[in-house]
């Protein structure tokens, strides 16, 4: 039976992962996931695509919302959570062409970041309703944090095993085995067939249900060692492009949107936990290779 075997939260977009045993699920993603991000002077998001060393920054949030950032050199800064209600500065920011307002962190954070990373600002998504999910795949009212496109990303260990086997076959001289952290998922599921997730339309994880809305097209971040920040060559993009193209893109994993349980109000829909059973409620024909994204 498929089980939830991995949980990952990224408090700041593109920084190092947290691996809790459980996580609250909100309509826009796991609680605390990607509510912060770095932006450039124009307000556009900054990720490991441009700054692979971002993955070496560690981020944790306290109960009062304070963010602690730890740089690769071990230096740390505590950043109070900014708020519109406290009249903190508001910045217009952008993720993949969508602009929305976010609260800007204190000036001390910008100075600290400039010394260790670059001339970037740190912003916080104070209003989780400010950014709509992609209307082509989402329903009206669906929102997302500062993740790339959708509230959650799911991967499976069986598909990773199959991908690693394909990479090994393409490199008889030898190649490193890619870990799951290259793909930066929120939910990792074990106990399926390879690529089974490509046919899922709706699933249950523990007591919560999710719509499976779109394959995840992969980018250069998957070639980045999450422990060292080094680019490691063309894999897995080369093999995915040859063997697992969906919607015209090298794909791995599926994007999810949580469903609100009947009778549940407020921001917390429920909790997912390691070991939760994963049940496939609905399937579809799968995603075509060359249909437009």
Image (tube, rainbow, N blue to C red):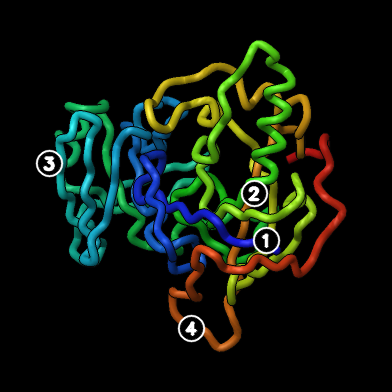
Q: CA distance from mark 2 to mark 3?
A: 40 Å
Neighbour tally class for label 3: few under 14, some 14-19, many 20 plus, Cα within 10 Å? few
Q: Which residue is mark 3?
A: 108
Which residue is depicted at the point 63% across and 54% down? 190
Q: Which residue is mark 2?
A: 156
Residue 214 against residue 210 in the figure, above or below: above
Q: Position of residue 109 (x, y in %)?
A: 17, 41
Q: Secondary structure at mark 2?
A: strand
Sequence order check: which comes first, mark 4 or mark 1?
1
Disc nearest the viewer among 1 and 2: 1
Quadrant for the C terminus, please: top right
Instruction: Specify the farthest residue to the bottom.
Output: 263
Mark 4 lies on residue: 265
Q: Sort mark 2 into few (<14), some (14-19) or many (20+) by Cα contacts within 10 Å.
A: many
Q: Tell me which numbered mark, 1 or 3, is placed earlier along the sequence.
A: 1
Instruction: State the image coordinates of residue 67 (x, y, percent, origin top left).
Output: 23, 52
Ranked by sequence position, the earlier of labels 2 and 3 is: 3
| 181 lies left or right of 101 | right
Q: Residue furthest top?
A: 173
Q: CA distance from mark 4 to mark 3?
A: 37 Å
Taking depth in this image into account, of 193 and 61 the one nearest to the observer is 193
Marks 1 and 2, how far apart in space? Answer: 9 Å
**Local SS, label 4:** loop
Which residue is denoted by mark 1 in the rendering? Answer: 2
Label tally: 4
Circles 1 and 3: CB atoms closer than 8 Å: no
The quarter of the picture where residue 176 lies is top right
Report if the CB atoms under discs 1 and 2 are less than 8 Å apart.
yes
């Amino acid at each position: 039976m498929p089980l939830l075997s991995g949980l990952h939260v990224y408090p700041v977009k593109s920084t190092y992962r947290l691996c809790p045993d459980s996580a609250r699920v909100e309509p826009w993603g796991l609680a605390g996931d990607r509510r912060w991000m770095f932006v450039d002077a124009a307000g556009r998001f900054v990720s490991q695509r441009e700054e692979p060393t971002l993955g070496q920054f560690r981020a944790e949030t306290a109960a009062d919302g304070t963010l602690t950032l730890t740089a690769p050199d071990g230096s740390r800064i505590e950043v109070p959570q900014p708020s519109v209600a406290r009249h903190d500065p508001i910045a217009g920011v952008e993720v993949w062409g969508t602009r929305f307002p976010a609260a800007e962190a204190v000036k001390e954070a910008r100075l600290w970041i400039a010394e260790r990373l670059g001339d970037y600002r740190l912003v916080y998504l104070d209003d989780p309703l400010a950014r709509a999910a992609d209307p082509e795949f989402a329903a009206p009212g669906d929102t997302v944090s500062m993740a790339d496109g959708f509230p959650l990303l799911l991967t499976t260990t069986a598909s990773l095993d199959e991908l690693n086997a394909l990479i090994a076959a393409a490199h008889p001289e030898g190649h490193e085995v890619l870990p799951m952290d290259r793909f930066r998922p929120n939910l990792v599921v074990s106990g399926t067939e390879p690529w089974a997730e490509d046919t899922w339309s709706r699933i249950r994880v523990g007591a919560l249900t999710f719509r499976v809305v779109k394959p995840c097209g992969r980018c250069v971040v998957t070639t980045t060692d999450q422990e060292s920040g080094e680019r490691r060559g063309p894999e897995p993009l080369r093999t995915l492009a040859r063997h697992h193209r969906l919607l015209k893109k090298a794909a791995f994993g599926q994007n999810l949107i949580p469903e609100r349980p009947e009778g549940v109000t407020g921001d917390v829909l429920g909790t997912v936990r390691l070991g939760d059973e994963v049940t496939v409620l609905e399937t579809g024909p799968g995603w075509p290779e060359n249909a437009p994204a």
